[in-house]
Image: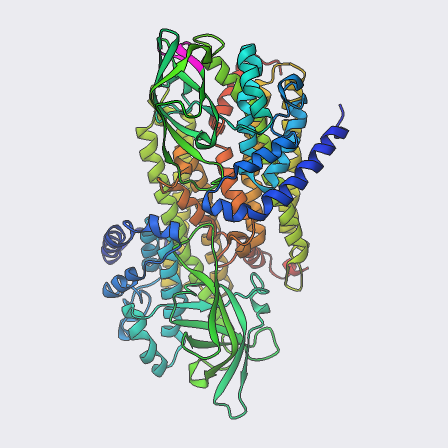
Amino acid sequence: MNFEATPIQSELRALTRKFAQTRIAPTVEQDERESRFRPELIQELGSLGLTGIPVAEHLGGAGLGYQDYIVTIEELARVSAAYAISVAVTGLPQVILSSFGSQEQQEQIIPRLASGEAIGAFSLSEASSGSDAASLRTTARRDGDHYIINGTKLWTTQADNADVILLMARTGGSGPTGISTFILKKGTPGISFGKQEKKMGMNISHTMEVVLQDVRVPASHLVSKEGDGFRIAMTALDSGRITIAAVGLGLAASSLEIAIRHAREREQFGKPIGHQQGIQFMLADMKTQLDAARLLVQRAAWLKDQGKPFSTEAAQAKLFATDMAMSVTTDAVQILGGSGYTQDFPVERAMREAKVLQIVEGTNQIQRMVIGRDVLQNREL
Amino acid sequence: MSFFSGFSTEEKLLQDTVRQFAKDHLAPHIEKLDEEEGFNREAFRVLGGLGLLGITVPEKDGGAGLGAVAATLAFEEIAAVDASTALSYLAHSILCVNQIALNANTEQKQRYLPRLLSGEWLSGMGMTEPGAGSDALGMRTRAQISEDGSYYTVNGTKTFITNGPVGDVFYCYAKTGEGKKDISTFLIDRSMAGFSTGKKFSKMGMRASPTSELVFEQCRVPVSQRVGGEGESLKMMMRNLDLERVTIAGISLGIARASIDAAITYARDRKQFEKPIASLGAIQERIAEASAWYDACRALTYQCAKLWDEGKLVGKEASSMAAKAKLTSAQMATKVGLECIQILGGYGYIREFPVERYMRDAKLIEIGAGTNEILRLIIARQLLGEAANG
């Protein structure tokens, strides 16, 4: 086992950190307050080769693995979880089409997303189908060489900014086998956006209702075959869970850093508060939890890169890293006390952002179901 | 020890009154005020009309003549709808008005109490400073008496002051000597020359309870504004912190109750996998756990308030017990708040539902009125005695 970063990973870390510090940090607080997303930042990330990291070189990607990808996601999340999520979300259609798309679909869609020129999104949830994704109601009816899609999607990240949305809709009977995946392009008549959700945090990353009224999509935009959509979505979520876990690492790492600095500098009772054992122990737990989470995330990424099954390990990484992020960011607010509660320090934002990581890409209850089922059915202990 | 065994008829009446008040005057506005960092000024006039702004003030001074149980109850009911207003109400009624009634002279009471009790004036308290948070006695704001002994010149900055931006009067502590304990109290009017309220803080939660600095620059304060003797405020300051902690636990209780109610309603209505999520064991466990901790904290808090009202909580024991009530309730409310967001999933994270606000508000109580860390220290010192100091 090797715990050292490869030269490429070190390079990615330095490159992303510099970009996040110089291009995202200066406006991130203001942008969060105004829910302002800057698409040009995705383009710039693309020109640095950071929006298509795990995608093959012949499709315009960097041809690297998830072990490299999570380095960039974590670094972005240290400054802005919303941009980290944006990069992860624009990566998802690339990863899905790389595995399931036709050659034509791959060549047409992936290079534009990998270069950052276009933005991608992924649309699965509906008002009444969240954790129970297989019960979705949006329909896609075959009509000659087209499909006609009707329904309403919820919680679609960056749908309003996306050029391409991968969308799950029902082409057959009820249950998971009736679901198919479609490529939806921006500007297709019949697509409109409902309300943009006002959220507790993560406001730069827009969360949209997508309304589909008689949207005509060429049959060539069906990914894989009819009935394959649920399997595709679940595979996408497996990969997505690794990136969401990496967002948790970044949020926790930056909050821990601020808490440590504060514990060193803030004096009460005539000495730095870091001298108090209560604070020391909190920091010790935070650091240990963060490192443990990072190892779980790296293991899941390694398995994926090796082409081995990684579904349960990705669920474990997501569960642990996002619960850890919630607890570490909450403790960071606590260590900063009154200052931590104000918007003058980024730890309160980190705490508000961490919460959503426990909900997206499968709530942590769903992760527990995945892990629980696996340990009961398949595992040798 | 006599145990708390439910509310008296009078307290139940108060509960109904406050519940109705919250429904009519707070519920319609709080979502917008939270978003815009506003303030429900009108609510205080209504509370004044109901006779609730001086909830702990004796009837002879124009108050309601009730005690810690009643105050805690009022804060719980208000916080279940709008924790920001509960916090501002507490800062006004417990941190300032209660202190004036207890410690001020007749002239001061006559000048301030009628306006503060009617809601014409709003008030707050000034203790915390940028360099003196948990270490409150490390405060540096100085009040220097003039040569003729007729006024003080006050210099310094107070921070994180609830009602700072909206208050007309502040009950402020300042050093009048070199020693740690040389603390005196002054009633500061907003109009005094050399006094200003510095920047307003943007906060994670409690956003409809405005917070700011209080800034003193050569502020001239007549001697008649001093409450009690010079250098004699430490004891009453600490005693008030204890009362603050008992009663602020009510805010945590109110927030937690509202969170649990919202989670229960949602769990019953929301169907996934073709049945209400309330039928899932994991959801049941979360709700059961939340409710059990809420009840435990509620029992401790009202027990503590009752002992306070009976005059049975004094000295270090009072500080320790108040710390226990607040420490447990505050932690419980944040934890319950986070769990309830989780039960609502995506809906818990958006502002259309109030549970994300409940959690943001709850977190404050783990920091304000003594951080969790300071409260643990107070409890430990009482238990361990001299050995705690090494």
* Above or below, A157 relative to B255: above
Is A236 in front, or is B93?
A: A236
Q: Looking at the image, which residue is at 62% across and 78% down?
A: B178
The quarter of the image holding the N terminus of chain B is bottom left
Rendering coords of residue B264 (x, y %): 33, 35
Residue at 27 percent across and 72 percent down: it is: B62
Percent from the top left, x then y, of residue B65?
29, 67
Relative image position of residue B375 (x, y in whole percent): 53, 56
User: Which residue shows up at 54% across the image and 52% down it?
Assistant: A340
The quarter of the picture where the C terminus of chain B appears is bottom right
Give the magenta-colored segment's residue range: A174-181
Foreground: A220 or A121?
A220
Colour setting: rainbow
Q: Is residue B360 left or right of residue B278?
A: right
Q: Is residue B150 visible?
A: yes
Q: Is residue A281 above or below residue A43?
A: below
In the rendered view, would you say A59 is above or below B41?
A: above
Q: Is residue A90 magenta?
A: no
- Which of these two is toward me, B110 or B302? B110
Q: Horizontally, is B197 left or right of B378 in the view?
A: left
Along the horizontal axis of the image, is B125 left or right of B271? right
Q: Is residue A176 magenta?
A: yes
Q: Residue A40's quadrant in the figure?
A: top right
